[in-house]
């Protein structure tokens, strides 16, 4: 990053708490600076103040804060900022109105109905960003080829369209003038099919600008992709955030003479590219800050480690950002931030709620880290402002942070050092809880020292941060141990060695400016311009010419835009992408052909087909060669290389490294003498053996025992991570190990799920994510079930335990079982459960079980699909498996299972499976998912021993039992205090009047309960019967919701509960009863009854409400009420009219609003990234 013209180059990361400034001075010297992002008593804008301080120091003269700075000495300013993110999180953007096609005014409010938390009884509805909605009279539809429909027009995708109704601009003009009169100046225009037919949006935008609206975001320009909901949210975010960004940019300009007219000012976008400040828009700015860090380690660590794949680990005060780089940036094209789904290229940065400020708790025998955070105010306990116990406090107690290396900016007067005493005091309170549990709990044990408790919390925090890294690597077919860990952020250096060890990595790379790596990334980043347009062509030889023409046109746009910014053509490169998917699937991949040169059977731009097949195989484990490939979008990314390169070299060593001081740090086994080195005094080639601390002004690096740090030629720290000395873990309960095993068991279930999703072929499993994976103990009791499908939670255990009893000794290595029968723990027949018993050398019986349950789209029956609406017997619902050996002796029984799947064809009026290929493929995927679970548990047994792993399977179930007992006692105690009985009841009815009755008797002393469903209605003739396993699943789900916090989700939840379900009732029907609807409908009523008994929520029964109507209006005007469920033949011209008056479950609209001054609902932590999106999608099924 040279300065040949003798001017300054600034790169500034304006974060939520601190602003980091990286400056290259004339002559090439580097200056770095960190200051508070908000300090209104001293300065108005942190980036301007940072520039002022460095110019002042370098010039040796006073530059008053109240005067604009002379910008003649500044060549460039690059900035990443959280302005857009904060405005979105705090809902402090511009006043916006939404213009949408008539009939769709509530579309974005309804959204996708995805839940942020599966177990949250008060599901928060994200606030919409717009203030008002105007419906636009216009309509464009796909051409249907019917007589009298008018002349078709061709859209940008190549599809034929019909303009059913042109835009009524006359009526719209008056409505827009009304918005202006009410002070709204920013618009988001979202019209149906505008991704391919943008003319209507362009007409609306032209009218709005003519009338004086200052900002108009057209969805067809913000992101021209199919799917109106995310496209609409993107346009709204753009209209909401861009004016706020522009105001900030204008204010920043005014801090300089000439308003930076001759200075190159660039802002970091979410995709890792820089954009001119005039082109910096809201929808592309949400990850502006974190993106700089990814660019920083990709331009430094990746190159210096010889191209070895890198995991970025950015641990800050509130959260940790995890990402991956292996030669190219990994982007996602749809991601949710603060409840708003944006359709825009973003680096795949996964944000998890574990940082230095994450709070520490001891709950029901578990060490818990986060997700709550102490924030900047009051901050951790050691900040001397009355804050809570945090990860930072634990590190301070362990001696891994030295108060003397921190400035005196703490306490009410912000003039005191960190307080180890405050950390110890806060930790002592939690340690008292821990030791009370250890001495008085179910397994009495020796108390822990204060340091052992602190160490336990640090170990649990490390395991929590490993989970997203495993999901980012193993779940996509990458081996985490083959990566380098690039550690940056203020808190990351204290945890890097432990994280790397846990993941099997042998190298940690910490840049010498790791505390300011995001700012350094800005200095090294390139300027990017992207062009994209939708497409609907097949990827086939006859379309290659059209694809090349489109890509050439977009490439020309990118080159022109970058040349307009002053880049010569020699510094501009372009990369072409096609958004491809197999026809009939919804799983599109954005692929580049840069590693696949063109062939005679590909477009000139490259062999995208080969790139697609290679990536699909890597991510999903199979390809579908017989399926055509569809092009959804064409995209070109143009890059203008900045030519800026870092030139400051580290000092040469003048002798052995100088020890600044000696301190005491606590590690496993006790305190050790630990030398402290100052990073600024270290030179190239210096080697430091752990344990030791390396300190600079922005971060502390802990080199653990058995590790060795070395200073590289570029002045960075490379740590060689030695193998961990195996500790002795016994079978007796240890709360620290219990917390770690809880994470490991849950991670195993999660990774099984990712393997199943990767390797399945059907839409139901791969895209709808309608499946669950779980781990079971030797008795078949559920140990860990990732929070997938609620109705599977308890039912799978019933299935496994049935097989154990049914088969007895007829279980052998190499066997895999298949079952779906309701009397064998099945939920309904389409949910096929694959169970693998796992044997271990020297053991005659299985030592544990793994299972996966997936919803198959068709298994035969009276109607196509998996949910026949009018079945009256189980045989009409498809293939039945009571206990079937899918794999026997290691051989997949394809012939036998094919025969069983076709067997329903022998039942009158029924058919066998209509999609045998997908059934077999998905069953193989379920076997593969189980195999992944076996491998991961095997690694766990290899690390700890079989007896320890089985013991902790039992301990984790006992912990869930303890949490439920605590909840039942608390509920009973509350009722007793109010003079209410310890028996509660509830009743609800199905649409046909069948009652579901529940009586719950609480035993306060034992913390137990009897759930008695006596009085529930008898089995019904239709298919709304629910097998017993459904009620148990509903009960586990409700108990977890009532506990109200994260607990291990397993069989222990039901241990304090006795369940009474009358045989022959709708909740325990006969073996041949039809049940396909009970899984999805009756289960909801059971949940409502349980939650209603506890008074936990309105359970869909609030008043006033009104019943809906299902009407069929025939072409001749005849109207028929169809009732709640029926099947009827319809003809062209008939209309189905669904009345949904609503009201029920929402309370009286006249109910008063919360009184002023009521405490606001705490903001949920803004998780982000592909790992979060996957979990959110699954929990929304």
Image (cartoon, helix red, strand yellow):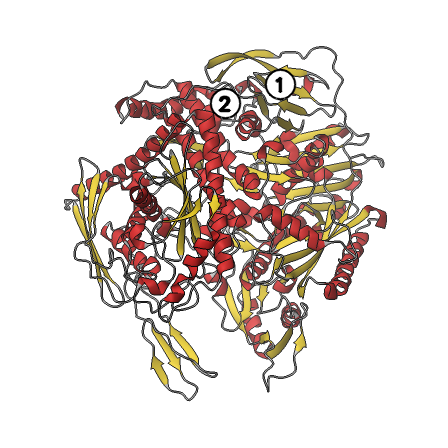
Q: Locate the N terminus by quadrant.
A: top right
Q: Position of residue 366 (x, y in %)?
A: 36, 31
Q: What separation in Å lies between label 1 and label 2 (alpha carbons)?
A: 29 Å
Task: Note whether residue 1155 is visible.
Answer: yes
Q: Which of marks 1 and 2 is in front?
A: 1
**How far from the left and from the top, in percent, is residue 178?**
54, 71
The answer to which quarter of the image holds residue 744 is top left
How many numbered tags mark residues here? 2
Q: Which of 576 and 544 is in front in this view?
A: 544
Q: Which of these two is toward me, 790 or 172? A: 790
Locate residue 1078: give its quadrant.
Answer: bottom left
The image shows residue 259, relative to residue 431, as above or below, that is below
Q: Is residue 863 above or below residue 1112?
A: above
> Position of 564 compared to 459: left or right?
right
Q: Can residue 388 be seen in this view?
A: no
SS for dot 2: loop
**Which residue is at a point 80% across and 36% down the rendered structure image?**
7
Near mark 2 (Cα within 10 A), the count class, few <14, some 14-19 or many ≥20, is many
Q: Name the residue under label 1.
A: 708
The reply to whether dot 1 and dot 2 touch (C-beta < 8 Å) is no
Q: Name the residue under label 2.
A: 418
Of mark 1 and mark 2, the one earlier in the sequence is 2
Q: Position of residue 218 (x, y in %)?
A: 62, 64
Question: Dot 1 lies on which element?
Answer: strand
Q: How crowded is mark 1: few (under 14 residues within 10 Å), some or many (20 or more)?
A: many
Query: Which quadrant is home to the C terminus?
Result: bottom left
In the image: residue 114, left or right of residue 1033: right
């Amino acid at each position: 990053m040279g300065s040949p013209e003798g001017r300054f180059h600034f790169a500034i990361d304006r974060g939520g708490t601190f602003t980091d400034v990286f400056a290259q001075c004339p002559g090439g010297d580097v200056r770095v600076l960190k200051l508070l992002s908000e300090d209104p008593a001293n300065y108005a804008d942190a980036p301007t103040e940072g520039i002022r301080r460095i110019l002042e120091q370098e010039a040796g003269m006073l530059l008053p804060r109240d005067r604009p700075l002379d910008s003649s000495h500044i060549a460039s300013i690059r900035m990443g900022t959280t302005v857009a993110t904060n405005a979105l999180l705090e809902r402090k953007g511009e006043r916006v109105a939404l213009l949408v096609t008539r009939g769709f005014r509530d579309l974005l409010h309804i959204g996708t109905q995805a839940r942020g938390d599966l177990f949250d009884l008060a599901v928060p509805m994200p606030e919409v960003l717009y203030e008002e909605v105007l419906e636009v009279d216009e309509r464009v539809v796909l051409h249907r080829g019917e007589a009298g429909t008018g002349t078709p027009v061709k859209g940008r995708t190549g599809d034929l369209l019909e303009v059913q109704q042109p835009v009524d601009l006359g009526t719209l003009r008056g409505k827009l003038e009304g918005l202006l009169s009410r002070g709204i100046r920013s618009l988001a225009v979202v019209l149906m099919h505008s991704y391919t037919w943008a003319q209507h949006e362009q007409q609306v935008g032209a009218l709005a600008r003519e009338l004086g609206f200052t900002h108009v975001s057209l969805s067809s320009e913000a992101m021209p992709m199919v799917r109106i909901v995310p496209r609409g949210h993107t346009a709204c975010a753009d209209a909401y955030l861009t004016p706020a960004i522009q105001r900030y940019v204008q204010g920043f300009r005014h801090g300089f003479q000439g308003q930076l007219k001759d200075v190159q000012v660039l802002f970091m976008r979410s995709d890792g590219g820089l954009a001119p400040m005039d082109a910096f828009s809201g929808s592309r700015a949400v990850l502006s800050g974190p993106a700089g860090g990814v660019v920083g380690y990709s331009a430094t660590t990746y190159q210096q480690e010889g191209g070895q794949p890198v995991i970025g680990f950015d641990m800050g005060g509130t959260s940790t950002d995890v990402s991956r780089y292996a030669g190219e940036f990994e982007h996602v094209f749809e991601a949710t931030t603060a409840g708003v789904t944006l359709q825009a290229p973003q680096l795949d940065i996964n944000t998890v709620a574990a940082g230095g400020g994450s709070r520490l708790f001891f709950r029901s025998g578990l060490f818990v880290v986060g997700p709550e955070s102490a924030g900047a105010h009051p901050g951790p306990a050691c900040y001397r402002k009355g804050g809570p116990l945090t990860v930072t406090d634990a590190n301070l107690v362990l001696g891994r942070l030295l108060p003397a290396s921190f400035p005196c900016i703490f306490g009410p007067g912000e003039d005191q050092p960190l307080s180890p005493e405050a950390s110890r005091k806060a930790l002592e309170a939690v340690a008292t809880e821990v030791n009370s549990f250890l001495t008085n709990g179910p397994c009495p044990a020796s108390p822990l020292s204060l340091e052992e408790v602190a160490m336990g919390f640090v170990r649990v925090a490390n395991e929590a941060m490993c989970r997203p890294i495993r999901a980012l690597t193993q779940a996509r077919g990458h081996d985490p141990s083959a990566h380098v860990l690039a550690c940056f952020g203020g808190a990351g250096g204290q945890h890097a060695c432990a994280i790397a060890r846990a993941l099997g990595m042998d190298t940690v790379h910490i840049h010498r400016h790791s505390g300011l790596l995001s700012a350094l990334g800005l200095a090294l980043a390139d300027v990017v311009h992207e062009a994209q347009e939708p497409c609907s062509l097949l990827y086939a030889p006859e379309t290659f010419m059209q694809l090349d023409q489109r890509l050439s046109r977009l490439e020309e746009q990118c080159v022109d835009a970058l040349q307009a910014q002053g880049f010569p053509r020699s510094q501009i490169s372009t990369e072409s992408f096609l958004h491809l998917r197999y026809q009939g699937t919804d799983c599109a991949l954005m692929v580049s052909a840069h590693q696949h040169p063109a062939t005679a059977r590909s477009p000139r731009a490259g062999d995208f087909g080969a790139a697609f097949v290679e990536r699909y195989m890597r991510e999903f484990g199979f390809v579908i060669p017989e399926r055509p490939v569809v092009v959804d979008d064409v995209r070109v990314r143009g890059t203008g290389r900045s030519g800026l390169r870092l030139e400051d070299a580290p000092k040469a060593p003048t002798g052995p490294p100088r020890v600044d001081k000696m301190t005491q740090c606590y590690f496993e086994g006790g305190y050790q003498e630990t030398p402290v080195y100052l990073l600024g005094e270290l030179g190239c080639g210096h080697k430091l053996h752990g344990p030791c601390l390396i300190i600079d002004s922005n971060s502390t690096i802990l080199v653990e025992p058995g590790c060795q740090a070395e200073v590289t030629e570029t002045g960075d720290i490379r740590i060689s991570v030695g193998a961990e000395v195996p500790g002795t873990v016994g079978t007796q309960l240890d709360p620290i190990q219990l917390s770690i095993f809880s994470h490991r068991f849950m991670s195993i279930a999660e990774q099984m799920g990712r393997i199943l999703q990767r390797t399945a072929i059907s839409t139901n499993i791969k895209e709808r994510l309608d499946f669950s994976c779980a781990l079971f103990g030797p008795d078949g009791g559920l140990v860990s079930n990732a929070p997938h499908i609620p109705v599977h939670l308890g039912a799978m255990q019933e299935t496994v335990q049935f097989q154990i009893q049914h088969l007895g000794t007829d279980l052998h290595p190499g066997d895999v079982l298949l079952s779906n029968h309701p009397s064998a723990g099945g939920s309904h027949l389409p949910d096929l459960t694959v169970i693998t018993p796992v044997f271990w050398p020297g053991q005659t019986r299985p030592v544990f079980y793994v299972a996966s349950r997936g919803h198959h789209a068709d298994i035969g029956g009276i109607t196509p699909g998996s949910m026949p609406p009018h079945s009256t017997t189980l045989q009409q619902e498809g293939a039945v498996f009571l206990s079937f050996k899918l794999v026997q002796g290691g051989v997949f029984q394809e012939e036998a299972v094919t025969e069983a799947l076709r067997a329903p064809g022998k039942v009158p009026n029924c058919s066998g499976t209509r999609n045998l290929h997908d059934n077999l493929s998905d069953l193989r995927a379920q076997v593969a998912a189980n195999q992944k679970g076996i491998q991961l548990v095997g690694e766990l047994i290899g690390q700890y021993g079989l007896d320890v792993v089985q013991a902790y399977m039992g301990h984790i179930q006992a912990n869930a039992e303890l949490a439920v007992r605590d909840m039942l006692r608390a509920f009973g105690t509350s009722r007793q205090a109010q003079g209410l009985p310890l028996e509660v009841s509830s009743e609800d009815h199905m649409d046909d009047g069948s009652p579901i009755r529940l009586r719950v008797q609480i035993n306060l002393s034992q913390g137990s309960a009897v759930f008695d469903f006596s009085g529930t209605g008898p089995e019904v003739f239709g298919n709304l019967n629910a097998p017993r396993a459904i009620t148990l699943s509903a009960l586990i789900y409700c108990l977890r919701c009532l506990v109200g916090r994260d607990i291990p989700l397993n069989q222990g939840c039901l241990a304090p509960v006795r369940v009474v379900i009358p045989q022959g009732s709708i909740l325990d029907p006969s073996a041949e009863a039809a049940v396909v609807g009970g899984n999805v409908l009756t289960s909801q009523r059971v949940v409502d009854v349980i939650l209603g008994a506890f008074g936990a929520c309105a359970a869909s029964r609030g008043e006033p409400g009104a019943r809906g109507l299902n009407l069929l209006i025939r072409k001749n005007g005849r109207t028929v009420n169809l009732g709640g469920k029926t099947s009827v033949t319809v003809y062209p011209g008939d209309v189905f009219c669904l009345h949904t008056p609503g009201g029920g479950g929402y309370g009286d609209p006249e109910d008063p609003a919360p009184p002023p001054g009521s405490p606001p609902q705490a903001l949920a932590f803004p998780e982000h990234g592909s790992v979060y999106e996957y979990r959110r999608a699954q929990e929304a099924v």
